[in-house]
Amino acid sequence: MSWKLAVTAPRLAVEAALARQEMDADWDPDLVVTGFEVDPKEPEIWQLDAYCPGKPSQRQRNAVKALFDDPAPQIRAEELPDADWVSESQKGMDPIRAGRFFVHTPDHPAHAEKGVRSFCIPAAQAFGTGQHATTAGCLVMLDAMKRRGVVVRNLADIGTGTGLLAFAAMHLWPRARATASDIDPVCLPAVCDNAELNGVPLGTGRGELAMVIAEGMDDGLIQQRAPYDLLIANILAGPLIDLSPSFAAAMAPRSHIVLSGLLTTQEAAVRRAYRKVGFRLQARLTNGDWSILWLRQRYLF
């Protein structure tokens, strides 16, 4: 029998918990986490569910509790009938449309409209199914950049999760070299599986995706393939600030950076950090309480 740990909390608390889980390199791969609105009549009340294939241990309970600020909300343990527990986590995950992209789980069909690129992303351990406001916002921003004439020949997606944002960028700039990385080892098989599912070629040539497990820019392949003219980082505000010097050092002249994973209240601090390393705001959008930033290098070399 499978189980789930359920937490009902304000929307912001659940969204922050999902973001924290994404960044936890030691997260238990047996815990599949999802968040959703409980009742459309009360959009500020959400639920976080953590599915596990057996009775949850105290360690697993503590891990879910640690996703929330003190005082942590009550955690409920529920035994589930025999079922595919990953499929259970996908229930209620409706497809999303973001720019020219349509993101769906295997339970839903692809979009039939001409000019719309569908991606099938199963809900699993890796973050970035498109359901989170930051991921969807990045898809919209990338689409807007393409429409405004941005040319990309070499791109990197740092903190890629499922690989979705890298896949989207490769669709927009199909001849670009593409590199994706994540700190979480579970993302390597997830990205490879998702690439195969969506017809995205893996490799190191143009139009192919090279995937590595690395912390930030600390990887030989990431450094060797620099300089980048597009870098995408949908992580958290703290790491975005800390990584700003190493991101900037890996960028080509007149390059672009897309940042997300930051709350609107954190935007000023993130923009300040990137101004110090030579990047200025080109455009921004908000999705709920989250900011998505398009920054461009201000220096001309």
Image: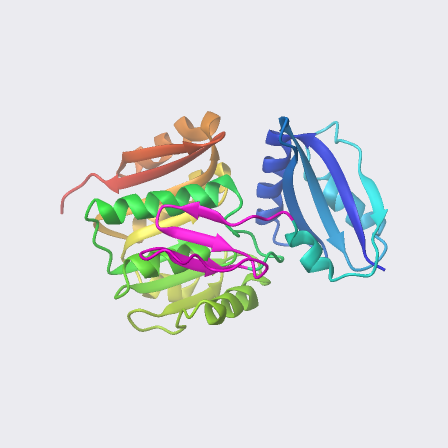
In the picture, measured across the screen, residue 268 lies left or right of residue 90, that is left
Q: Does the magenta portion include 107?
A: yes
Q: Main secondary structure of the magenta part?
A: loop
Across and down, in percent, residue 35 comes to 64, 42
Name the residue at 47% across, 65% down: 212
Name the residue at 43% across, 40% down: 260
In the picture, measured across the screen, residue 44 lies left or right of residue 238, that is right
Which residue, as the protein is rendered here, is positioned at the far left? 301
Q: Which residues are magenta?
A: 92-121
Quadrant of the rendering where the N terminus is positioned = bottom right
Across and down, in percent, residue 248 comes to 31, 46
Across and down, in percent, residue 217 comes to 42, 55
- Does residue 259 lie above or below 9 as drawn? below
Which residue, as the protein is rendered here, is positioned at the far front? 112
Residue 216 seen by the camera: no
Across and down, in percent, residue 77 comes to 84, 44
Count the labels in the image: 0
- Does residue 141 lie above or below 211 as drawn? above
Residue 299 seen by the camera: yes
The one of 125 and 103 positioned closer to us in this rendering: 103
Q: Does the magenta portion include 226?
A: no
Name the residue at 71% across, 39% down: 66
In the picture, measured across the screen, residue 263 lies left or right of residue 279, that is right
